[in-house]
Image (spheres, grey):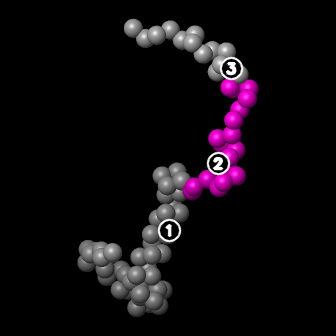
């Protein structure tokens, strides 16, 4: 991937590399994207995927709720 940054951001990357904070602009951008992803996850804009155990818990069958659904099936009035 090739990205062209505005001069100001390019200058910031060059300074970070010159100061020894990062070995390369690529490393700095990678870290910036990692931090952005973490920040977005905190805001639920980019949620962390569920583990297999969490997904099983969330989507597990609920026999009590299924019984309620069956008892109500067909009782809704059609919209006019």
| Crowd class of label 2 (few under 14; some 14 to 19; many from 20; radius 10 Å) | few
Badge number at residue 55: 2
- Residue named by callout 3: 68
Q: Give the Cα distance between marks 1 and 2.
A: 26 Å
Q: Does label 1 or label 2 sit earlier along the sequence?
A: 1
Magenta highlight range: 48-66
Q: Is residue 36 magenta?
A: no
On screen, residue 71 above or below 28: above
| Crowd class of label 1 (few under 14; some 14 to 19; many from 20; radius 10 Å) | few
- Residue named by callout 1: 35
Left of 43 or right of it: where is 6? left
Q: Quadrant location of the N terminus?
A: bottom left
Q: Does label 3 or label 1 sit earlier along the sequence?
A: 1
Q: Position of residue 71 (x, y in %)?
A: 67, 15
At 39% from the left edge and 83% from the top edge, which residue is drawn? 25
Q: Give the Cα distance between marks 3 and 1.
A: 45 Å
Q: Does label 2 or label 3 sit earlier along the sequence?
A: 2
Left of 47 or right of it: where is 24? left
At 46% from the left edge and 10% from the top edge, which residue is drawn? 78
Q: Secondary structure at mark 2?
A: helix
Q: Which is in the foreground here, disc 1 or disc 2? A: 2
């Amino acid at each position: 991937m090739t990205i062209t940054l505005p001069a100001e951001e390019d200058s910031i990357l060059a300074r970070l590399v010159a100061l020894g904070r990062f070995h390369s602009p690529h490393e700095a951008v990678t870290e910036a994207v990692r931090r952005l992803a973490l920040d977005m996850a905190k805001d639920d804009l980019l949620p962390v995927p569920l583990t297999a155990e969490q997904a099983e818990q969330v989507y597990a069958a609920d026999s009590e709720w299924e019984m309620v659904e069956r008892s109500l099936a067909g009782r809704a009035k059609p919209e006019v």
